[in-house]
Image: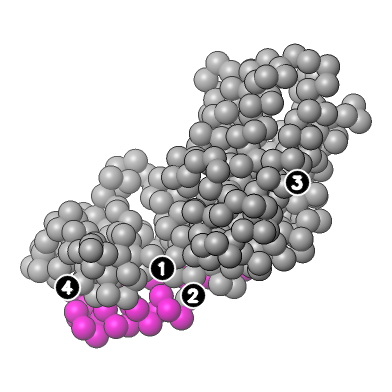
Amino acid sequence: MGDTVGIVIVSHSRDIAKGTADMVRQMVGSEVKVAFCGGNPDGGLGTSVPSIIDAINDAWSAKGVAILVDLGGAETNSEMAVEMLEPVRRDLVVVCNAPIVEGAVMAATEAAGGSSLAQVRAVAEELSAD
Amino acid sequence: MSLQPETFKSLVKVAAEQVIASAPELTSLDQAIGDGDHGTNMKRGFEAVLGKLDAISAQPLDEALKMIGKTLVMTVGGASGPLYGSFFLAAGEALSHDKHLPDDLADVFGSGVNAVSARGRSQVGEKTMLDVLVPVLETLKSAAGQPDLIERVRATAAEAAERTVPMQATKGRASFLGARSVGHVDPGARSSCVLVQAVCARLEEK
């Protein structure tokens, strides 16, 4: 089977990020690369740009990476992290507008079938549609 | 006012120290209408800036501003990291492209303000740091070259932060509160005011 889109989970809480990644692995299996991060640079609640960059690189796939976030700061920091990637990688990473747990499971399920980054994102973002 | 490296270093130092000293106030404002981490986040970011102050001020001004921006992005740990970080990154970028201080101060500051607006997908009037930064930019333009520029910028920042009290937040965490966000100074507006006023106070001493 070819490469699949990687999934990154970014929560303010490392426990939520890890728990979400655990659910994805149990429900979708291990063929999709899943990385997670949570907590500010001191380990308290928050998000950290360097940790997000590391997670994107851990989940890297030639097909791209879809990021699922919880609240505002996670989204802003994820967008910043994407801009700080090497230029060749930037266009292959998207931040999905989707609920973090359901979005991660749906995105990973779609990714496991070999779908493109745009398809993975669309499936996750359907959850936010009216 | 000309911007010598030693002056720049002292401005960064005093701005960072003032933000760090304001951390408890910023946190209590953020506990009222946000998630209560603005003070600790800004403190962590500006402590990192202070830790690199010698390296930062050894750079040409454009690179120095970008280094401050990148440090804030990498260390703040909340949305204010990319927001303030983008301000300094864009201001530094403007200086890399034919803009000079002090002549182009309003343009350089304006580049920073635009970057904050783009990063936060926010406009003035939404109870954010832009509600201080945009009025300050307007004063920098309208009072450019006037002898009382610094005093007017300082007054603008203070008045603008107070004007966020009756605003209802429509961006950021405070927007979750809806009408309950009314009645408090916005923490981001307050931290912007602290930074602007610290720089003004130091320049007035010169």
* Mark linked to residue B194: 3
Q: Amino acid at mark 3?
A: Val
Q: Amino acid at mark 2?
A: Ser
* Mark linked to residue B43: none
**Distance from Cα at disc 1 to Cα at disc 2:** 9 Å
| Chain bearing mark 2 | A
**Distance from Cα at disc 4 to Cα at disc 3:** 48 Å
* Mark linked to residue A13: 2
On the same chain, marks 2 and 4? The answer is: yes
Q: Position of residue A35 (x, y in %)?
A: 35, 69
| Chain bearing mark 3 | B
- Left or right, A53 with respect to B169, comes to left
- Of labels 2 and 4, earlier in sequence is 2
At x 56%, y 35%, the residue is: B113
| Chain bearing mark 4 | A
Question: Label 4 neighbourhood size at 10 Å, few (<14), some (14-19), many (20+)?
Answer: many
Tag 3, which secondary structure? helix
